[in-house]
Image: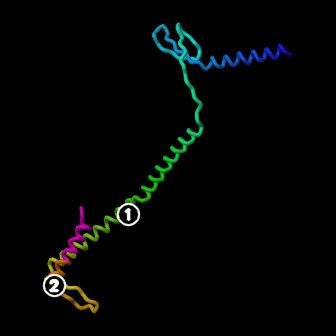
Amino acid sequence: MKKLAIATVSMLAIVAAHSAVAGDIYKWTDAEGNVHYGDKPAGDQPERVAVDSQPTDPARIQAATQARADSRTARSEAAAAAAASAPSAEQLQAEAAERAERCTSVRAQMQQLVTSRRLYREDANGERVYLDESETIAARERVENQISEFCRG
């Protein structure tokens, strides 16, 4: 029984020593000058390379992965919000058509202001109230502002 225990301990020691050697990395140069790396020494003068290994911190990896996922989610949500808030082509065309219609309307108003001898407005009873000079100037300025707003470009 004692021999069996000694044999078992010896085998475990050999396996443990072999696994430690199996983790070594060697560097050597062949006859043609090419550099090789491997886990078994070969070539004329193999050199053992010291490799420092540290265990991976799962919490750090998880945090980095979560940060990347959050960033991707935020970018995709921002892109979706931008796409949703951007007016569609149909909306842009409708706005352009409405602006062109308003432009035509205010240009017609300006033409009327310029060609009319006397300007008037109708009161609540439907009777004409003629505009004086300052009211005429104010009306023209208002229409000019509307022309600059709707007829740009």
- 49 w.r.t. 107: above or below: above
Quadrant assignment for the C terminus = bottom left
Is residue 129 covered in magenta? Answer: no
Residue 79, percent from left and from top: 44, 52
Q: Residue at x 17, y 80 (%)?
A: 136
What residue type is disc 1 on? Gln
Residue 81, percent from left and from top: 45, 56
Most foreground residue, 91 or 5: 5
Q: Is residue 37 left or right of residue 145?
A: right
Please identify, in this view, whether the residue under mark 2 or under mark 1 is nearer the observer. 2
Label 2, on which residue?
132
The earlier-in-sequence mark between 2 and 1 is: 1
- 76 w.r.t. 54: above or below: below
- 41 w.r.t. 51: above or below: above
Q: Residue at x 76, y 17 (%)?
A: 9
Q: Which residue is drawn at 28% across and 67% down?
A: 100
